[in-house]
Amino acid sequence: MSEVPQKPIDIKIRWATPYDTVNFAKFVQKTAIGEMGYMTMGSVDEGNLVYYCGKLIQVGKVVIAEVSGRIVGVLAMDKGTEPWAPAGQYFLNLEWFLVLEKFRERGTAAKLLEWLEGFADEHSVPIHFGLYNSDENTKVLEMFMKRKGFTYMGANFQRMPSSGKQEEFIEE
């Protein structure tokens, strides 16, 4: 049995604007938190998520992939620096790299990354990606990054508490 060819679709890649804030936040909540189960905290405050997404658009770099006005992928980078770096020197640090599953095979992730790489090369800004998901996608992401010329620099580990409500432990 032969495979049915996929119908070509027009995937538009563009910078996010403040008008995208709410839909960007909804997309992150649906994909990163809903479908992928990625969450470093026990719950999500939707107002805080919308606020944070708005700040990323304002001070970071957020690239959106859309089809017919619907977000199908997001590459969100925060502007980062090191405490010892000279003033004005920064890098782009990954916050979210999310693509709806049915658009992953259509080159959407590569298009998002190419858009951001063009900006980074034009402005001589390094890009830093951390690997935060723990399923088999981590292997795919590692291969993707190596193929695109990125250098693997380690991994991140996280341990969630066994139970209970988080208590304040830093005195003000």
Image (spheres, rainbow, N blue to C red):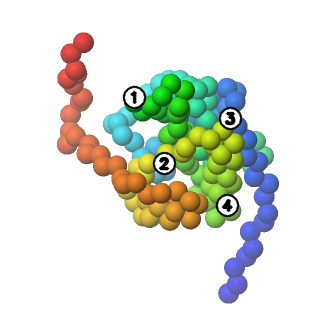
Q: Which residue is mark 4?
A: 107
Where disc 2 sits, the SS reads loop
First reached walking from the N terminus: tag 2 or tag 3 = 3
Residue at (46% x, 43% y) in the render: 33
First reached walking from the N terminus: tag 4 or tag 2 = 4
**Between 108 and 58, the one nearer to me in the picture:** 58
Q: Answer yes or no: is residue 40 visible.
A: yes
**Between 25 and 150, the one nearer to me in the picture:** 150
Residue type indicated by callout 1: Pro
Where disc 1 sits, the SS reads loop
Q: CA distance from mark 2 to mark 3?
A: 19 Å
Q: Which residue is mark 1?
A: 83
Q: Position of residue 18 (x, y in %)?
A: 67, 26
Graded by Cα atoms within 10 Å as few (under 14), some (14 to 19) or many (20 or more), the crowding at tag 1 reads: few
First reached walking from the N terminus: tag 1 or tag 3 = 3
Graded by Cα atoms within 10 Å as few (under 14), some (14 to 19) or many (20 or more), the crowding at tag 3 reads: many
Residue at (55% x, 43% y) in the render: 126
Q: Which residue is mark 3?
A: 16
Between disc 1 and disc 2, the foreground one is 1
